[in-house]
Amino acid sequence: MSTISSRSASAGRLLRQFALLLAVGISLAGCAERTAPTAAVAHTEVLQLIPAPAQAQRGDGSFRITTETAVSVAQGDAPARDAANHLVQLLRDTRALNLTVREESAPSPASIRLQLDPQSPVAQAEGYALDVDAQSLRIRARDAAGLFYGAISAWQLASAEVGRGPIEIPAATIRDWPRFGWRGQLLDVARHFHDVDTVKHVIDAMAQHKLNVLHLHLTDDQGWRIEIKRYPELTEIGAWRTPPGAGRHGTPQRYGGYYTQEQIRDLVAYAAARHITILPEIDMPGHAQAAVAAYPEEVGVTGERPSVSVDWGVNPYLFDTDERSMKFIEGVLDEVLELFPSPYIHIGGDEAVKDQWEESPAIRAQMRKLGVKDAHAMQGWFNAQLAKYLTGKGRRLIGWDEILEGGLPESASVMSWRGVEGAVAAAKLGHDVVLAPAGWMYLDNLQTERSDEPNGRLAVLPLSRVYELDPVPPGLTSDQARHVLGAQGALWSEYIPSRRHVDHALFPRLAAVAEVAWSPMAARSWDGFLVRLPAQLQRYRALGTDYSDGAFAADIRIDGGPNAVLNGGPAKIALGNQTGIGQIRYTIDGSEPTQKSSRYSAPFAATLPVTVKAAVFTEDGRPLAAARGRRFDHETLLSVDTQGLRNCHDGGPLGLRVPLLPDMPGMDTPVYNVDLFYACWTYRQARLDGIAGIRIDAARLARNYGLAHDQSKMHQYPSSAPQGERAHGELEVLDGCDGQTLAKVALPAGATLGEQFTLEAPLPPQEGVHDLCLRFTASIEGPLYAIGAVQLIEATAQSPPAMH
Ligand code: ACM
């Protein structure tokens, strides 16, 4: 996706009332369950299922699973045996309970029984009936997927608690089936390559969330990730790039990787065993630079060979539209169809800037011959060729919503990412649609405004926002709504270089994606979801999944902001968290908070300097978020980190949170919030009384962004240095962006990317609070400069800061 597209993600509803704890779990269609009467949620009252089932009713008592419990299936009932094996494996992994699957003509007493049953009470595809009473746990379904999902639900009921050994499962009657047949998650393996084990890890997680389409974004400007035997250079050349700053800070000299066809077959089979279809995406005609780097003569428009791109965003390279290129593409698709049984094949279609086509005499001549009026219509023609080819092979084309712009082949389906409008337009035209709108479903957006967030995009996409999406947009008739196949999350990987980054971005938001795609609106409730989430976090911990606890982590701040204290007021510490759930326990003596530490209820007075540490627990004492700490002293009150800086236009967040170098894998990589168009940051409400200087931690980063037609929007701040000294530019400190210049520091010479440095300058005496504007005059042709932190320095008699 584009680095530059605007997002509508709001900061989300920040529900801060602990009153939420009064709410209880699942509000179920046809369910007699009621709200718990006390403030403390007894989680045993709630059926701990995510996604929420269509219908469920809690019964009396419970069923006890011990090592003696038989897991039984009828002889020859292969779907039941497979689902039972998954259940047993998950119980082993998360509860250290070893059960064995037995083939028996009739279930033994006190057993778990799974059965493919054409008379199962749930007739819907992928649905299941799960009945638990004191004697047995019984799963029936009319298809194999339904049995599998029944097994997942049984496992969830059994894994809500920490522990080993015998498990009590609440008696219940569950009748469940998915709202949508397409419940997906996109994983971009092109921008950063994720190995087979990581993809299997994602597949496992998807299965545990009842998701069933893994959309693998296999090709893009920055890498071609699937072996094509006919065209070996697609991976020999196209899978590798030389990263900016190669070799520094542990980054490789050559970055890349790809899946062999054998590995793809293995992944497809692994996914199929978990009722997941892998949807392959070969992105065309844009996002083609890696392919053109490998085969410039065959598929390039200009015939020139570029390198595999290191620039995120929108690059100019397109597939050619002549016969040779179209045959090449068919050759690729022939092998893709061999490998992937998916009924849909994703042909991309997004962000294809048409300059190369428009500038090519050959393509212009072809357009005239075809009677095609412009380059958009030419993309329509291109897509029509692909659709014809795919339908001829019994498959269906799906593409991003840009494919609507050039006229859509009748058989095509649309994946709506630029909001929901594409979905609405396509459904009204009678095309099937999948909802993946960026403002709700792009999980590379950060989840919180916390300073401990890793790399990512800076529209904050909180869990609550993901949860909000109704995949059927308003404005569709019920006939048109039938074209909505489902919904999916998207994990683009420009800022997701490692498995830990994948985990951090996906979890727990994948749980919200699952409920959006599976559960009927009547069964969905944000408050109920929050009550069921701690059990899900417990499962993540048991499975070793590195989920983000950011939505629950304690935000620690000075009530009223630092100036309240700098102005001579008392220091009051305020704690809270994004979702507003849980009990916050804190210390002020530097020790690690436990469940026995003081419980936070309202802002409390503290004497500075103080180190506040806070951890968050559920009412019944399970961990919600690990401890976070923050020190408040005079120095920290006079400082701000990159996350505390705002953009210079409307005071909003900056656009991207980028690592020191683009291919650094570590979670603790230094990060810098940047706005690609304006090298300008605002330190709001800086109190300058008694301040004599400013110190800025900065870095020289790669400017690795393809901005296409937005290139011209990059702002160059003029340098006021004498001619000979302008080479590297300066950092300027202004009193408001339109105000007077307070300080100016030359940037260090050199062009080494990933270099961190500190700039220090005296400030003239000022009074009161000022919005300081910090901007770089370095050339926009060169590296990107960024600010990591700002420290105001107080005047001391002895040592005013020196001008560098
Ligand atoms: C996209 O994000 N370019 C589909």
Image (cartoon, rainbow, N blue to C red):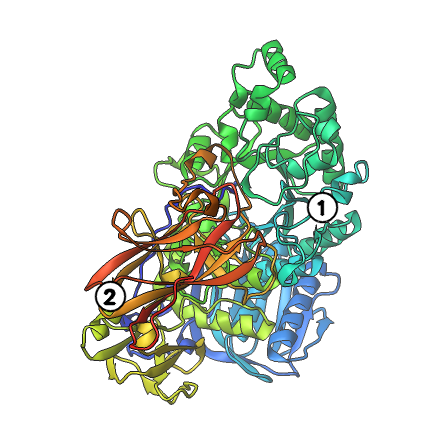
Name the residue located 63 percent from the left edge and 28 percent from the top edge. Answer: 387
Q: Position of residue 709 (x, y in %)?
A: 48, 32
From this view, report whether residue 586 is shown above or below residue 486: below
Classify residue 245 by image quadrant: bottom right
Foreground pick, 188 / 655: 655
- Crowding at dot 2, Cα within 10 Å, few <14 / some 14-19 / many 20+, comes out as many
Q: Position of residue 63 (x, y in %)?
A: 53, 79
Left or right: residue 704 versus residue 672 is right
Q: Which residue is mark 2?
A: 687
Nearest to the eye among marks 1 and 2: give it. 2
Inspect this view and state whether residue 503 appears. yes
SS type, badge 2: strand
Residue type highlighted by circle 2: Arg
Classify residue 116 by image quadrant: bottom right
Q: Which residue is mark 1?
A: 239
From this view, report whether residue 246 is shown above or below residue 344: below
Left or right: residue 245 versus residue 792 is right
Q: Quadrant of the C terminus?
A: bottom left
Residue type highlighted by circle 1: Ala
